[in-house]
Image (cartoon, rainbow, N blue to C red):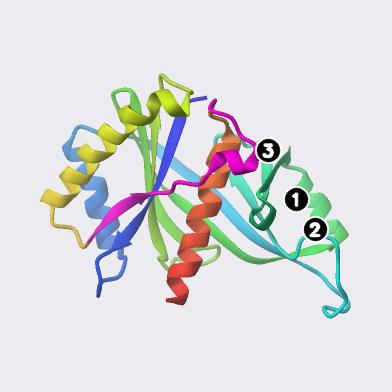
Amino acid sequence: MPVKWILHWQPNPGTTVSTQTLTEVCQCVESIHGSKDGRWKATLTYYKPMLRDPSVPTEFPRDFLGIALQEQPGKYYFIIRSHRIILEAESSIQIIMEKLQSYKSRVSLNYEGFQYQLGDFQLRIGKAAPSHSESLRGILMEVEYLPISSLEKSKRILEDFVDILRETITKKSLPGHFIPIEPNFGEYGLADRYTSQHTAIQYAAAMAHLIASGRN
């Protein structure tokens, strides 16, 4: 499948993310002839175990992430970041987990917004907000290069394209900039050929950054 880079919005010191910034980022993409091509959504859920006695040591993970991607509606991805493990399951696993009551959802976050077509590139720009809330927590952008599925071969092309986007945003004098999410895929045992598991790992890193920045 095509390679994707995921970038998160880093506000300038003393500023915060806003819907106005999100609107202006979309306008920047449209100014370089990006054509709107529908909506997109990804949902990340942070799970914690249901422990009868939290003081008793356990052998199973203390927490993990579950990720639902629009590109793979029949799949669900689990990531245990502390052990660098990613698992792919059928989406029905969520129903099984709910019945077993072994783990409980603590936080659920939606990334959603608009999709744009721009030559050989597909862009998705949207907000991060808790489920059942319109509160804006962050801004995220996916950049997908459609012709290539090799991380290494697409790297220079994506770098050049992201530089063009950054330059366009800088000219608009927006209060921040996009930073690529750059996890080490090798730590998870993933190869150079891009898969949806690579996408899930980038979303997990984006959520970790969002939680960390919220604590600062």
Which residue corresponds to mark 1?
94
Percent position (x, y) of residue 167? 16, 44
Is 174 part of what is drawn in magenta? Answer: no
Q: Which mark is residue 194?
A: none
Q: Give whichever of 91, 208 is nearer the camera.
A: 208
Q: Amino acid at mark 1?
A: Gln
Q: Give the alpha-carbon distance from disc 3 to disc 1, as whole Å.
A: 10 Å
Q: Amino acid at mark 3?
A: Lys
Number of callouts: 3
- Residue 124 falls in image quadrant: top left
Q: Extreme left residue here?
A: 171
Percent position (x, y) of residue 131? 55, 62
Q: Is residue 53 left or right of residue 45?
A: right
Which residue corresponds to mark 2?
98
Q: Secondary structure at mark 3?
A: strand
The residue shown at (75%, 65%) is 62
Magenta-highlighted residues? 176-193
- Residues under numbered marks 3 and 1 in contact, where contact means CB atoms less than 8 Å apart: no
